Image: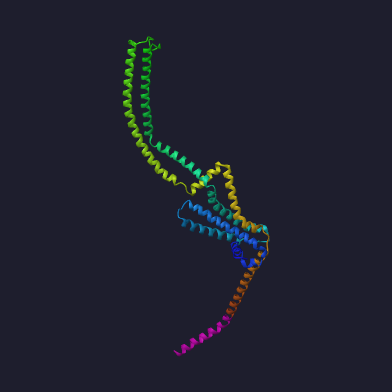
Amino acid sequence: MNKLERFLVFCSGAYLPLVKRCPGSIHQFIGIGGTVLFTAVFAGLSVGYALFTIFESIYTILAVGIVWMLMIFNLDRYIVSTLKKREKFLSELKQALPRLILAVLIALVIAKPLELKIFEKEINRELDRQRLATISESKDEIKAGYPELLKLEEEIQGLKAEINGKEAFRNEKQVEYDNERFGVKTGETTGRAGIGINAEKKEAQLDLAQKDLEYTQSLNREKIQDRVQKINLLNEKMTAELDYQMVSVAANNGLAARIQALDALTNANTAVYWANLLIMALFIMIEMAPILVKLLAKRGPYDHLLDLYEAGIVLSADELWYKKKSESELRKEVFDEIQPERRVARRNFDLGLFHKK
């Protein structure tokens, strides 16, 4: 095997010296190792994109991405290496079930940031739509906080309506005066042409209506200008408040906002929903592939050699323990035999010292 093949066998969690003794199983472990390796690479890319939406430092993204990739690699390698082939499929399935559940959870974590990258354009459009809706709601909320603004606008409309009413009345008198001069018969005119008494009365009424209009225009325009200035001040305050809120709205482009936008897209668009579901299923199958391969594969020479190797280690440890235990018991028996002689010698020694004294 070359270096790449040995590395992929290492990724599969298999014991290389035993794999070398089973040439027929080498490609199986190379495939399992490649799946574990690529899953870890996908995990690194996934968390890298997720961090890209949070941090701006490329060094932070690389450091955390590499650590996450190594952690997923080590976890997947551990999951695959601890799954051993047994004689019965049900016992293997019971052994593999917790590992399959863990693999599904890992796949879901890995798939989500990559889904965000795949649907990035659609998510950006959804975020823009939500941002515009938020701006509109913010404007309405801010405007609701200034009830005097609506009152000022209503007063302006009332002043303009008063001017329009005066102008309409002046125009009406203008029409009556013209009809009287030119002899047009109406309910308000005599029908005799020329400037007579009635025409002079109509002209006087027209002059009064014109003066009243000019006075109303002069007075109401000042009032309108005053209210417009107040409205402008209120608009400036509302604009300042809206700008303050827009800072947080513009910054609402993080990971949580994108996940929420993707959820809204999947709920609103059937095509996006199924595409998202298939991508998630793909990553789940990739993450579960090494476990499923080992679970569905038949018990091969490598599994027999591994059992023999481990059994040899256990047997050797038992033999060593038995040997140590036997030696310890022998030393204990010897100690028990010489112990009475030591007690007698010790007593004679003590008596000799006593007689000397």
**Quarter of the rendering containing residue 301:** bottom right
Work out which quarter of the rendered image holds the C terminus and state it: bottom left
Q: Is residue 52 left or right of residue 95?
A: left
Identify which residue, 124 or 143, lies in the foreground: 124
Identify which residue, 171 or 290, lies in the foreground: 171
Residue 190: % across, % down: 38, 10
Q: How many numbered marks are there?
A: 0
Tell me: residue 236, above or below residue 94.
above
Tell me: residue 71, above or below residue 225.
below
Q: Identify the residue at horizontal 32%, vertical 23% (top origin).
A: 214
Q: Identify the residue at horizontal 61%, vertical 74% (top origin).
A: 320
Q: Is residue 77 left or right of residue 246?
A: right
Q: Does the segment drawn in magenta span residue 122? A: no
Q: Residue furthest bottom?
A: 356
Tell me: residue 303, above or below residue 141.
below
Residue 171: % across, % down: 37, 19
User: What range is drawn magenta here?
Assistant: 334-357
**Quarter of the rendering containing residue 209:** top left
Residue 13: % across, % down: 60, 63
Q: Does the segment drawn in magenta span residue 337? A: yes
Chief secondary structure of the magenta portion: helix
Identify which residue, 296 or 58, lies in the foreground: 58
